[in-house]
Amino acid sequence: MKQERSFPSVTVTRKAENSARAGHPWIYREEFTQVSGEPRQGSICDVFSQKGAWLGAGFYSETSKIGLRILSDNANESFSDAFFERRVKYALEYRRAVMDSLGCCRLIFGEADGLPGLTVDKFSDILVAQSLCHGTDKVKGVIYRALAEQLAAMGERVSGVYERNEAALRELEGLPKYKGWFEGLPHPDSTVTEICENGVRYEVDFENGQKTGFFLDQKYNRRAIARLAKGRRVLDCFTHTGSFALNCALGGAEHVTAVDVSESAVAMARKNAALNGLEDRMDFLAEDVFELLPRLGEEHAGYDLVILDPPAFTKSRKTIRSAERGYREINYRAMRLLPRGGYLATCSCSHFMEPENFEYMLKNAAKDANVRLREVEVRKQAPDHPILWNVPETAYLKFYIFQIV
C-alpha cells in the first residue's frame, strides 16, 4: 500500500529499487513502470517500489535518460529553502575539515554533496558554477546565496558567482547553454583572477579556461610530484596551464619542459611561470605529445621524470578500447624515454576507464617497453572531490607514480 504523499510519483522496477536502496541517487526513465500525478520538469517527485514502498524523493526529468535524481530518503522532508541551505552547510563543513584551505577548492561536487548535477569551484573570492540538472537549476539562487552567506561567516569573501553553463548535457535537461555572471548577486567586471595553490600562483581565466577555469582535483598529487622532482629534469606532458610543471620547478627541479598542443594553454603556462619567477628553469613547447614522445626517444632526451596528465580519452563505454590504445601509446613512449631509475607519473581522469583496465594497460605498456615498474604510490582525486562508494560515477581520477627498474 503506497504512503499518502503530496508529490507526484513514479513506480520503478525491482532493479531500480535495489539500486535506490543501495544508495544510488539515479533512476533511469527506462526503469519507470508507472507515473502518477502530473510531474513537471525539475519538480519534486516521489519514488515507489512495485510493492508500494517509498524509496525517496527527488528531481524529475521528462527529457533526460536519468528520469529522477533522488535528493533524500527522509519521508518528512519538505524540500524548502532550508533543505538546500543545510546541504550547503554540510558541504562547506566537510571542506573545512579535509582541506588545508578554502582559498581555491571545489565546494560542491554534485551527487557527492547531495546537490545533483551541480559543480561549484572557488577561485580566491570568485565562485564558478555549472548546473546540469533542471531541478537544481531552479533552486540555484538559494544555493548560491547560501554559499556566499555561509562563506562570509567563515571569513571567506565572495565577490561574485560566474556560471559556466555551456555543457551539451544541459540540453538533455531542456536547459539553455550560456555563460555569464549570476545576476542575483553583486559581481566584478573582470573574469580573470589569481589563486595560490601549494605555494604556486596562477592567473585563472574562469570565462574562457577549460571546465571552470582550473583543474583543482590534482592539488595533492601535484604536491607529491613536487617532492619527487627535486634535482631532476622533468617533462610535463599535457601541461594545460602549467600546474604540474610549476609545482616541480618550485619544488627544486633542475629543469622542467612543459608541453601542450594548445598554443593558448602554453601561453598561459609561460605567463604563470613568470608570475612565480620560475622562467629560468623552465621551457615550453606547443606540440602534440603523441608526436613529441617518439622524437624525444630517438634523440635520447635526458629526462628522468615524465608526467602524463592527458584529457579524458573516453567519455563513454563505447570508446574505451580506442582510449586504451591512446593511453598505452603515450605510456609506452614515456617508459622507453626514461632511464633506469627514472620516474613516471601517469593518470586517467575518465570515470569509464576502470582502475583494473588502466593497470592492465600499464602492465602491457611496460612489457612492450621491456621495463619493470616499481610502484611508488597510487593516488586519487583530492578530497574536495569526494567519492561516494555507492555512487561509482563520483570516482574518476586514477594517479600512479612508478620508478623504472
Image (cartoon, grey):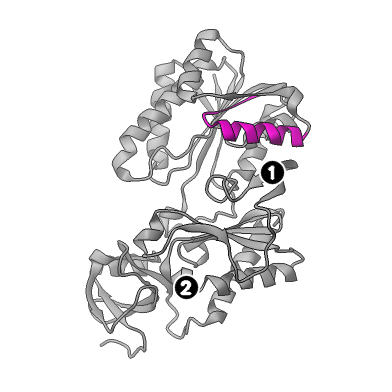
How many numbered marks have been drawn onto this rendered protein structure?
2
Q: Where residue 209 appears, x then y in whole percent? A: 57, 45
Work out whether 7 lies above or below 108.
below
What type is the residue that disc 1 sits on?
Answer: Glu
Whether residue 42 is visible here, answered yes or no, is yes
Work out whether 367 lies above or below 29.
above
The residue at the point 71 percent across, 32 percent down is: 273
Q: Is residue 192 left or right of residue 307?
A: right
The residue at the point 74 percent across, 71 percent down is: 153
* The residue stretch that appears in magenta: 257-276
The residue at the point 71 percent across, 29 percent down is: 249
Q: Where residue 220 appears, x then y in whole percent? A: 64, 44
Magenta span: chief secondary structure: helix
Q: On the image, which quarter does residue 20 sit in? A: bottom left
Residue in the foreground of this view, choosing between 318 and 261: 261
Residue in the foreground of this view, choosing between 85 and 157: 157
Query: Gap between marks 1 and 2, in whole Å?
Result: 32 Å
Q: Where residue 137 appears, x then y in whole percent? A: 47, 68
Whether residue 97 is visible here, answered yes or no, is no
Q: On the image, which quarter does residue 96 sit in? A: bottom right
Residue in the foreground of this view, choosing between 230 and 243: 243
- In the picture, which quadrant includes the C terminus? top right
What type is the residue that disc 2 sits on?
Answer: Lys
**Residue tagged by mark 1?**
203
Q: Where residue 87 appears, x then y in whole percent? A: 56, 71
Dot 1 alpha-carbon crowd within 10 angstroms: few under 14, some 14 to 19, many 20 or more: some
**Residue tagged by mark 2?**
138
* Residue 261 covered by magenta stretch: yes
Q: Earlier in the sequence, mark 1 or mark 2?
A: 2
Does dot 2 land on a helix, a strand or a loop?
helix
